[in-house]
Each structure stands twice: as structure tokens, then as C-alpha cells.
Amino acid sequence: MSYDVGGVLLERPFKIRRLGHFGFDNVAMAESLAFYTDLLGFRLSDVLSFNRVARDPKTIEGLGDTNGYMLRYGSDHHAFALFPRRVRQALSHRPSNPEVTTNQITFQVGSLREVVEGHDYFKGNDIEIQRAGRDPLGSNWHTYVYDPDDHVAELYYGIEQVGWDGQAKPEFKVSRPFFEVATLPQPSERDEIDEALKKGIVLSSGHRGLETLPSKYEVGGVMLPRPFKIVRIGPVRLFVKDMAKAEAFYRDRLGLIPTEEVVWQGQRCVFLRCNTEHHTVALYPIELRATLGLSAHTNCLSFGLQMGSYKQLKDAIAFLKANGQRIVELPPELRPGVDYAACVFDPDGHALELYYYMEQVGWDGRVRPAAQRRKIVSGTWPDTLEPMADTYMGEPFLGPLG
Ligand SMILES: [Fe+2]
């Protein structure tokens, strides 16, 4: 069966273009919000109140912070979602794998049609759908499904772009939210904005995330509150119970392309990409979690945060250490295509993988032979590096660093 995707026949009715956003459900919410904003530099776009969403707010009383936080590093309304784990569990009507602490693993496709037809495709292939429609915050059109380990994966199109003034759209006043899959066609965002203006909505009345820390560090000639800048997100590394099932989902259903496999300590690990980066998603047998000494509360090995340069990566590690954070270098064999990297841990124990380089894969799908890759020795960080053919390549960061 082939599907017409913008005039090209593909195996499925959509083509994933990039990892768009990701999220964690955390318990230590105040500490986590400070960690992701003050330490890592994410900016708050909008706040989702579960008190407003819950049918009966009493069900979430006494569970701590009842807000979800939508955070960004660039112009996408959200690249990272920090949600309250206890509240989400209390509101869930579906028994779920308790080790799933990823809130969502979200992929951008090329059009609204791809999101909508993707929904029908998942339904027709017995993939469980969590929900479909359009986010009230971020106004992206979406289809959410479960992977074989219960992680929620999302296809989306058209996320709100936050501009120079840092202001999100006024909540619920410009975009029309949808709680079911959209019919086609829909009006453009521009027409919605014109409609809102006609109704007298003040476009500048949305939320604006404030930076509270002084700009003390020079980063590439610009003064910033921390000595680095996140310029891209991903890869997402997952521990899975059944490698064959997980591979089949990400390869056959989502259409990610297998790049490389690695056997480490007798365990086979698989790397898949959606664009030119070596991998966007990596799958590891759950048995490796204990071997690596990672938190048993989650089956997410790590979530990647790409720094703007090698110097920024080193400076980020020094900055985080100076701020009392634990830094761990995981075995380089588990991240082919990424050279220097280190993990920092959020207050719930999720690993964030900081790196600056990702091998780029071209039209023929061939990866760099292992012998031609940089030799990484954990704990050894040269002052400067010789370039690789694809250093600083791939999707660039748009706009000013801060
Ligand atoms: Fe999403």
C-alpha cells in the first residue's frame, strides 16, 4: 500500500521531518522548573492548569503543583513539557506502565493532512490512539499514539512560533482548540489571527516568560545568563522491554530509518533517524539500565540537549558542576554518531545528555565507518578539536542566542 504525500508515494501517509518536542512527568516540580529554566535556560511559554482541565478538581487536591509547564529554547512554542506526574496519574483513566515518565515524544510532519491521515493510518493498523485534535497551548494539530512500552508518541503540524517579543498567543482567544481529529481543510493561522483582531482580541495579551538571572557569561560574543545555549533537542534514548516490538513500531509505523546497530555487553542497541542526523531515537534493552546505574524509576535512558559548540558543551559541564549538579559520562559505545557528551540529572533523576555534535547521514544512508570516528576517552576533554567533515552541520538554530 502506498500513500500520496504531497505528490510523492510513500509507505505511510506522513513523513516525520524532525523531533519537535519532548516532555517529562516529574514529582519534584518546583525544583524541576528551576532546573530546566534557571540552569538549562529553557523559557516558559505557557502554563497549563490541570485544575481547569480536571472534571473534578478534588481528585487532584493535595498532590502538589497542578500545573504543566510549556518551555522553549527557540521559536517553537514548546520544545519541552514539564508536567506534574502525580496529578497526571490521578487523572489517568488508563492503566499505564509505571516506568513511563516521558510525557510525550513528538515528531513534526509536513502538513495538517499528514497528521489527519496519520490518525486514520494508526487506527487501521491497530495502534492505540491516545487523543487527536489540536493543542489549546501551542496550537499545533496533533495525533497522539502509544508505543509498545506505553510511551506516548505524537505527530504534529504547525506549532505556534514565538517571536522577538517572547509573547505566546493569548490563551484560548486566537486558535480554535480541537478535541477530536480535524476535518479538512481548515483555515490558516493567519485567517484565525485576522478573525481574533476583528473581535478586538489584544494580540499582545499572551504569556511572556521572563529571564530572572543576570547575563554574566559571554557566549560567542553575546552576554547570556549561562555559558551555553541549547540549539537543538534530541536524541531520545529509550529502554524497552521487547526490542523487536519497539523497533517495529518506530521503523514500520512511524517510518524512522534504522541507521546503525551496536552490541554492547552482549546487548543489541538500535539507532534510528528521521532526517540527516545519525539518530533521533535510540532503543536499548531494559537490562542495560541497571548496568549503567541509571534511575530505576524511568525507562527513558536520556533526552538530548545539543549545545551550540564544543566550547559551550565544556562550559556547560563546568557551570552545572559549579552549581552542584552531578555529571556522568556514559560509555561512548552507546552513542555512535555523537562524540563528546555528558549527562546531567534533573531533580527526579532523568538523564539529560549534553552534546554538541551529531554525525550527518546523506542520501545513501551510509554512516561513517567506526574506524574513522573520533576516539573518545571518557574523562578526557581536549582544549580544541580538529573538525570532522560534518562538524556544525545539520539543522541550524535560527535567531539570536538570547
Ligand atoms: Fe505535543
Image (cartoon, helix red, strand yellow):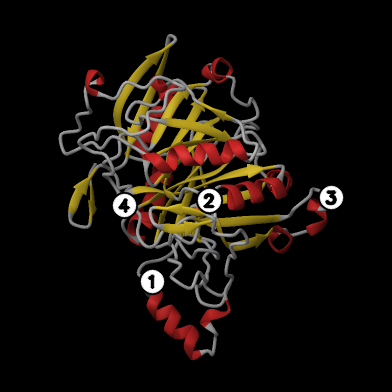
Q: Which of pointers 4 and 3 indicates the residue nearer the eye?
A: 4
Image side of residue 36 versus residue 146, left or right: right
What's the residue type where badge 3 is placed? Answer: Gly
What's the residue type where badge 2 is placed? Answer: Arg
What's the residue type where badge 4 is placed? Answer: Pro
Give the crowd class for mark 3: few <14, some 14-19, many >=20 residues within 10 Å: few
Which residue is more in the foreground, 232 or 318? 318
Residue 141 placement (x, y as % from top left): 44, 61
Q: Residue beneath label 1, please?
A: 186
Q: CA distance from mark 1 to mark 2?
A: 42 Å
Mark 3 vs mark 1: which is more N-terminal? 3
Can residue 250 be seen here? The reply is yes
Are the residues flagged by discs 3 and 2 in contact, CB closer than 8 Å?
A: no
Label 1: which secondary element: loop
Q: Residue beneath label 2, please?
A: 226
Which residue is more in the foreground, 384 or 295? 384
Q: CA distance from mark 3 to mark 2?
A: 35 Å
Label 2: which secondary element: loop
Image side of residue 97 versus residue 90, left or right: left
Q: Is residue 225 above or below residue 95?
A: below
Are the residues flagged by discs 1 and 2 in contact, CB closer than 8 Å?
A: no
Q: Is residue 135 above or below residue 164?
A: above
Q: Residue beneath label 4, please?
A: 396
Q: Residue beneath label 3, please?
A: 62
Q: Which of pointers 3 and 2 indicates the residue nearer the eye?
A: 2
Give the crowd class for mark 4: few <14, some 14-19, many >=20 residues within 10 Å: few
Residue 1 placement (x, y as % from top left): 24, 41
Q: Which of pointers 1 and 4 indicates the residue nearer the eye?
A: 4
Label 4: which secondary element: loop
Mark 4 vs mark 3: which is more N-terminal? 3
